[in-house]
Image (cartoon, rainbow, N blue to C red):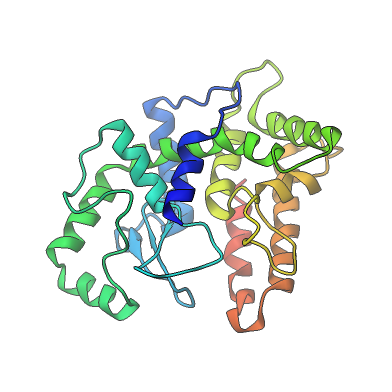
Amino acid sequence: MKTVFLGILLSVTLFSAEIDLSTRQANYIAQKVWQNEGAGKDKYLVWWNKGEDFASVGIGHFIWFPKGHTERFREVFPMVVAFMQQKGVKMPKWLNAETDFPWQTKAEFFAAKKNKTKQYRELFAFLKRTMPQQAEFMAERLRQALPQMTGTINDPKKAAMIKRRFNHMLYKKNGKIDERGLYILLDYTNFKGEGTLKSERYKGKGWGLLQVLKHLDEKNSDKYKAFADSAKAMLDRRIKNSPPARGEERWRKGWNVRLDTY
């Protein structure tokens, strides 16, 4: 499964827009996303959330599975590591794009965290010093999101609509990158995915960027609010359709607080 997702990262044809982050932009977005995901606190840089069967690491709380784990959600951290390898970023010797999360259970992980084992310390230090590069990865993922989304749509008119709405968020009227729109697209894609993975569905309905753009109200003159409103509607639908045992209602308030930053 890791290989499939890494292939997506490395082989998708990029659309024409360039999303090259300056150092200032990379640091700004890294801090904004990190505030959303971990309240900007170091203790959440390597974490395992209550009610989840996988770890969340880095500024984007990228999903990372223990060995042999299967889930409906996209495992993103191996994609981050592959990106880092391409960029020549120095990392712990034991870490590469095929490495599983080092601790098999939540109890094992928190024990290692409490005792500050060497492997935990090396992982934490790596994530702490590569925050801008993690933001660059998210920009790279966003760069690939549009062709991924339109590639799932057979109707040319609907595909054109998604492209138009995506670009409306990404650009100002003068054709320059809209930093706030870039943050919104980048953050939501990292937060809830592109919306193209069929396994990321409840009752056949997704909640990723694709679904938000499909349901976005173009008549709303405030494009930021239009996006946030659509995202809230998609996540409300996700909660409604989710298996009761997952208890996703408990996340509604926090999700909405995040979307209110848009």
Residue 169's place in the image compared with 244, above or below, is: above
Give the position of the C terminus as an image quadrant: top right
Residue 72's place in the image compared with 99, above or below, is: below
Residue 214: x percent and y percent? 78, 45
Residue at 73% over, 58% down: 234
Residue 168's place in the image compared with 208, above or below, is: above
Q: Residue furthest left?
A: 118
Residue 253: x percent and y percent? 62, 68
Q: Nearer the viewer, residue 216 or 160?
A: 160
Residue at 51% over, 42% down: 8
Residue 202: x percent and y percent? 70, 68
Q: Nearer the viewer, residue 220 or 234?
A: 234
Q: Nearer the viewer, residue 159 or 260?
A: 159
Quarter where residue 145 is shown: top right
| Relative to 39, 166 lies left or right | right
Residue 184: x percent and y percent? 60, 42
Quarter where residue 88 is shown: top left
Q: Residue furthest top?
A: 174
